[in-house]
Image: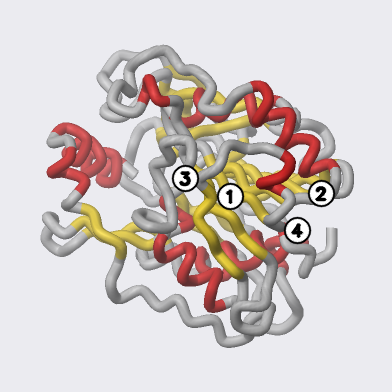
Amino acid sequence: MRIFIALLMVMLSVGAAGAQQIINDPDIDTHVARPAFPQDHGPVVAVDSGHNNYHTIDNRYEPFAALLRSDGFRVVDFKSPFAADALSKTSVLVISNALPGALVNHWTLPPSSAFSRAEIAAVKAWVARGGSMLLIADHQPFAGSARDLALAFGFQFEDGVVARDPMDGRPDIFSNADGTLQSDTVTRGRPADEPVTAVRSFTGSAFKAPPGARPLMVFPPGFEIHQCGLPCPAGVPERDASGYLEGAVMSFGKGRIAVFGEAAMFSAQVMTTTKPPYHFGFGAKGAEQNRQFILNVMRWLAGVLPQ
């Protein structure tokens, strides 16, 4: 993780030019051997781009969209404000790293909601009626910007960065073997060859879930929540992250929601300026099962997998 944080610091320090150093992995395999739906006949997955999102299907989440389309989902860009009429046209709403306009170029400002009260009420009502939502909020300032929406469903994000203490360079791998990846219908998938026993993430945020939620990814001892964004200076306040979550699912009314504190694990990218190039997301070493995990999460949200 220390290596990944250092790379992120380099990217952020050089601004727009740094963003060009990270590209979607051109060699990533998004083929699905046993699609859940006939091609282009699955549920509509609407990926939010109307809230200054850092991850959208025309940039950092292009591999995510390609994988879902291979599974038969119909993936569309969602630019509209959240309102009942617009939401009624979709089955699964994906929100990843949204920001209010004021924070787009000023990540150090105090956190504020990326969503209006009316939008939060509309999403909550839509899920209760049977919609499904995947909410992803990464390290500061993204967790703070999603906090009000998450709280509407009982999830409490911590706006900071979660890292090992000491940061010893080991990747963040959640596994069944050590209990950090919980056994669930999501991790088991469909019968045959779809169980997921390990998932890798790439630095993010932590949250607490309401009693009705099912934890999926649980931080073990040795992780701490640092009260900062990236780059994170030395000496900032920190506290134990053990027991906090980086992934969970929950039924809500007639609908379903999945909440995660890390966004890169759902895509596949490569930093081209390192030697060798640094891969992260589902093309990275240790993330070989992330691709199946993404499919399982989305299939659960779409109702393919049981509650």
* Residue beneath the point at 36% across and 14% down: 109
Tell me the element at label 4.
loop
- Rounded to the nearest angstrom, the CA distance separating label 1 from label 4 is 21 Å
- Rounded to the nearest angstrom, the CA distance separating label 4 from label 2 is 18 Å
Work out whether mark 1 precedes mark 2 in sequence or the reverse, and give the earlier one.
1
- Rounded to the nearest angstrom, the CA distance separating label 4 from label 3 is 30 Å
Mark 2 residue type = Gly
Tell me the element at label 1.
strand
**Closer to the eye: label 4 or 3:** 3
Q: Is residue 142 above or below residue 169?
A: above
Label 1 environment density (alpha carbons within 10 Å; few <14, some 14–19, many ≥20):
many
Q: Quadrant of residue 283?
A: bottom left
Work out whether mark 2 precedes mark 3 in sequence or the reverse, and give the earlier one.
3
Work out whether mark 4 precedes mark 2 in sequence or the reverse, and give the earlier one.
4
Query: Label 1, on which residue?
Result: 94
Mark 3 residue type = Ser
